[in-house]
Each structure stands twice: as structure tokens, then as C-alpha cells.
Amino acid sequence: MRLRSNTNKPAHGRQPLGPTSGNPLRRRQAFDPAGQFLNPEHQSKRRRTMDKGKQLEEPVAVPEKRGRGRPKKSTQETVELSYNKYTHLQPAGESSKSRSSQSKPPSPRKAGRPIDQLKADAAITMHDLGQFVPSVKRLDMRAALLRGNVPKAVTSLYDTVTDVPMGFIPKALKADYLANFLTPKKTRKAPRDEEYFTGTTSPFPQQSIARLKVSIDQIKKDADETYDLKAHERQWGLVVGAFLFECKVAYPDLAALNVENCTVEPGLFRPKLPSGENFLQDDSEGGKSEDTTAQVFSKIVDYSMALRLPLDEQELIDEVYNTLRPGERSLNQSLSYITNCPLFADIELKKEQAPRDPEVQLALWEAAASLKRRHHGWDSSLPMPGITVNGHIWNFYIFFEHAEKRLTMIGPVRIGDTSTLNGTWQVLYHLFNLCKWGLDSYRPWFTREVIGWARKRTGKDNPISSEETADPRTPRRDT
């Protein structure tokens, strides 16, 4: 086979291959690193592609836009194109700015700062609450009794919670549960005999047993589904709300309130550090915010149980508000829509492994209630019960003031577990007993301390003027 001379015009319009292309020995030198043959035309295309990629890695100057629509005194912009072989593997929506921010080192202003200057609501612990005013210290009942100065009302409430039977399922439902659980394959176990109520007095009304069974079965089913889904804590609120609905039906003189958006107001009733300062929280730049206490004392607890006041007492409370400063016109530690609601029990719920400690939030709320009582001169010996719901687990706490501006927190005491049928009935059992305590113990205290105080301020129980009988510890009416 004869080789085509490079001096002749190539066939089909091709360009000459060069002075050495006619020699087959010289053409063998055009191999790529993988050992595959590349003719000079393919080789030149590859070189052009590599050179083009190198040019794209360098900054490209965008020419200045001319004509109408261009702002005056605009300068030429420089756009840096970061092309590389991994560009097509980057996740969608991720920019180079976000990638660079992830690897950014922490700000030097935040390094080495003392922990007492970084107090956010999620960082406050029970140990920190022991340093606030009023202080809150958690003890078990035995340690509190050894220390002494435990009011009788506290021990009575504690005995009501702890001195309970082992079983809580009403005996009247034993036949129904056996019929439901004895399936042909016996895949479901019926309640054991010790899980049925053996006490002398049941808080469940006999005429409502059948309806309560339907409600309890649905509550347990909802709790199991919420736990399996790892849902938000608001989904657990449906479980708590179902329990509170049964409380309202059984005790119509009581109310169940959603207080998750209620803030401790005014700042006079917010616990502070011994120096009188608020605990601080860092802002995004590492500095101290001016007053982050409002953030810490917002959305503290989720539900509260309260008394329903008759019309004559509502009118008396509205009249006594006219003798108080605006920040004092409330029966509790908040100025939101619950101002006319006497709260006697509070519930804070959290899903399991939540970042904020429900015990801390409950303690902050009760500490504010203690300051409210002290401010108006109401008796502070009556305990303040609270409940935390952490997933399936329900725990009970008792707060009381053993000294001025020093609170003791008794607990936790397990009062139920919605993962079991007996535990679900146990929660309702304790909630009904708590409602009964609200009517038998809290209601007389409220009538004596708050209604009696309101009558004195308005002159309802004395012919002399209200200015002469006003409580000296309470500020006079604004003029």
C-alpha cells in the first residue's frame, strides 16, 4: 500500500496532516496514557478541551453593561467561576457560600466566655435554679422531712399521690376486657388480676365507666401511634387534651386551659440572679442581648387547670383591678387571656429526648407563681402541684415555700405510663384526684386569701373606705 504524499490535497476536503504524518513510525507516537491510539485530529481536540478548562478556572471579567438601565458610576464586576471535575456532583440548591460557612471556625468572641453569661432557656439546669431568686431546690420527700419545715398541706397532697393501689382498671370492665383480648390465636394478653382497682373508693363515676373505657382505649392508641411516629410534642398535646377533657366532664366547676403561649408578666414576677440581673443569652454576634428574660419566660408550660369563678366573684375581681397597677391585674403570673383564671395545677409536656428540660420550665413557672403570692401578701404555705409529660411517662411534682424566696421541689413521682393499659388508667386516676384536691383544698384557700383580700381592697366587708383598709404591701391605684 502506497502512502499519500503530504503535498497532494487530501480526499473529502480534509486538511493536510503535517510534515511527519506520512510516516507510520512517527504516527505511532500519538498514544494517550491509557495506551489507546489517538490520531492527531483527536489529539488536538483533547488539548483544546483541556486548555478551555484551565481558562474557565480563572476569573472572568464581565463587561460593563452600557445603555439605558445601567446605574450611574457603576463599576465593572468580576465573577469567579469555580469549575472543577466534581461540580456536577454537588447537591442541588447548595451554594459555594453555604459550603464555606460550614467550615468556618467559631467566632473568637465566643471562645472562653464564662457559662453564667451564656444562659439560654435550653441551657438552664436545676443546679442553676438553686442560685436564682427565688431559688428552687429539688429534694425527695424523705430529705425534705429531715430538713423540717414541711407544711401539713404538702404531706397530705404527697400521701394522696403515693398511697395508691397497684391496679387502676375498674373491676366492672373485667368481663369486657376479657372478651376483647381473648382472641382465637391469643395474640393479645388480657389485664392481670392485680391490674384491676382494689381500693375502697374509686374516683371514676360508676355511670361513666363504659364511656371512660372507650376514651382510655383511644388515648392509649393515640399515644402508641405518636410514639412510633416520633412526632412533634404538639402531637402529644392531643393525648394530654383528651385526659383533660375527661376532667372537665367529671368536674364541671374546673377548667382546662392551653397556656403554651402565655408569658410570665410583668418582669417583677420573673426569677433573677442574686445580683438582681436577668440571666443572659448570646445573640448571633456573640454579644449579650439587653433583656432575653422575656424569651426564657415565654412558652414555659403547656396546660393549666383552674377554677371556674361564679359571676359575683368575677365582678369583684374586675372591681379590685381598678385599685391595682396595670401589671398587677391578674390572678396568676401572666397578663394574657388567663388573667381571671385561678390556676392550681400546671402541666409541661415534652417529647422524649427534647433539648429543653421540662422540670426546669415547670420550676420557672412555679417560682413566678410564688413571687406573685408574695407580692400581694397571699398565704404561701399551700403547695403548687405540677406535672411533666415526657413521651409516655407522667411525673408529679410538689412545689412549696419552706422559707422566704426559697422553694422546694418534691419529685418526681411516677403517676402513669400511657404505653400500658393499666398505666393509662393510672394517669386518669391521679388527674381526677388532683381535680378533687383543687376543689377541696385550693378552693378554700382561694376564697380566704384572694377573695378576702379583694373584699378588703374594695371595702366590701368593712364600712370604712378602701384607702384605709388597703394592703400596705400592694401599690395604690394609679392616678
Image (cartoon, rainbow, N blue to C red):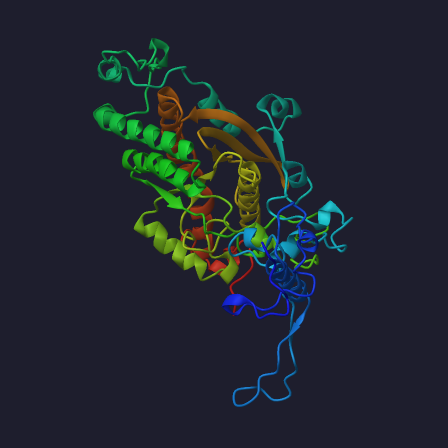
Whether residue 473 is visible here, answered yes or no, is no
In this view, the residue farthest toward the front is 2
Residue sitting at 48 percent across and 43 percent down? Answer: 301
In the image, 213 versus 35, the foreground residue is 35
Q: Is residue 302 above or below residue 282?
A: above
Which x, y percent locates residue 128? 67, 40
In the image, 112 versus 386, the foreground residue is 112
Which x, y percent locates residue 2? 60, 57
Q: Is residue 392 above or below residue 453?
A: above
* Image-quadrant location for residue 179: top left
Q: Is residue 281 left or right of residue 197?
A: right
Q: Is residue 348 left or right of residue 118?
A: left
Residue sitting at 41 percent across and 38 percent down? Answer: 236
In the image, 445 versus 21, the foreground residue is 21
Residue sitting at 58 percent across and 24 percent down? Answer: 141
Q: Is residue 215 left or right of residue 322?
A: left
Which x, y percent locates residue 333? 50, 50
Q: Is residue 369 left or right of residue 96?
A: left
Whether residue 272 is visible here, answered yes or no, is yes
* Image-quadrant location for residue 168: top left
